[in-house]
Amino acid sequence: MVKETPMILQDTTANPAPLGLMGFGMTTVLLNIHNAGFYELNTMILAMGIFYGGIAQIIAGIMEWKKNNTFGTTAFTSYGLFWLSLVFLILMPKFGWWNGTTAGAMAIYLFMWGLFTTFMFIGTLKLNRALQFVFLTLAVLFFLLAIGDATGSSAVTHLAGYEGIICGLSAFYAAMAQVLNEIYGKTVMPIGPVK
């Protein structure tokens, strides 16, 4: 009788979280500079939404699946698809494919993303402080944007823009902290304790 020896596989793939966080962070900052009222919605924001906010995050989500990380897979894939759906909501009426969405429908869309993000934030309570901050500020951002669309208040939308810039920069920080901490083999940029 031949004795079977179990094979142990070691995961040597790279950490996909910085890619996903950068795709989210940079695109969020750029869109929210618009929401804060500094410049119009333009092709630069839409292109970032498709490629870096959308496709790059989906790729990061698939890579997280390979690493057996349900949270990372759900977060990056979902927010990547959020960016793609947002760009399509903006572009489809311009191409004459469908009528544009109403402010009420857009408010519900943003509210549902806020609700999803609130539950994802609860998941971060078992992760590091940097991710907790990213998801908390993102939930607040979605709810502020929903209120802005529901009420038609440009003041609320501008406030959301400033809050969104902070959210996006926090994701940028969390991404670069992971990259630099790995490269240097020590904590160069702290992200807080892991539970």
Image (tube, rainbow, N blue to C red):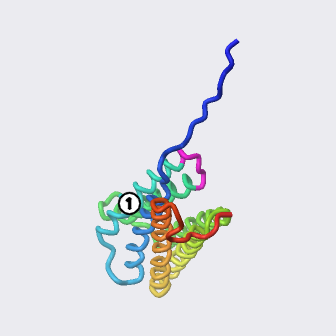
User: Which is more toward the observer, 104 or 7?
Assistant: 7
**Where does the N terminus fall, quadrant-wise?**
top right
Residue depicted at x 46% and y 74%: 169
Residue depicted at x 44% and y 68%: 25
Task: Please give the residue where the numbered disc 1 appears in the rendered image.
Answer: 52
Q: Is residue 21 above or below residue 38?
A: above
Residue at the extreme bottom: 155
Q: What stretch is highlighted in magenta?
A: 65-71
Q: Residues within 10 Å of mark 1 (few under 14, many from 20)?
A: many
In the figure, is residue 114 to the left or right of 24?
right
Q: Does the magenta stretch include residue 44?
A: no
The image shows residue 145 at horizontal and vertical percentages of 50, 76
Q: Does the magenta stretch include residue 66?
A: yes
Q: In this view, does 33 lie above or below 129?
A: below
Report the number of discs: 1
Q: In this view, does 140 lie above or below 112?
A: below
User: Which is more toward the observer, 98 or 23?
Assistant: 23
User: Which is more toward the observer, 104 or 43?
Assistant: 43
Q: Is residue 111 visible?
A: no
Identify the secondary structure beneath mark 1. helix
User: Which is more toward the observer, 149 or 179?
Assistant: 179
Q: Can residue 23 be seen in this view?
A: yes
The image shows residue 46 at horizontal and vertical percentages of 34, 65
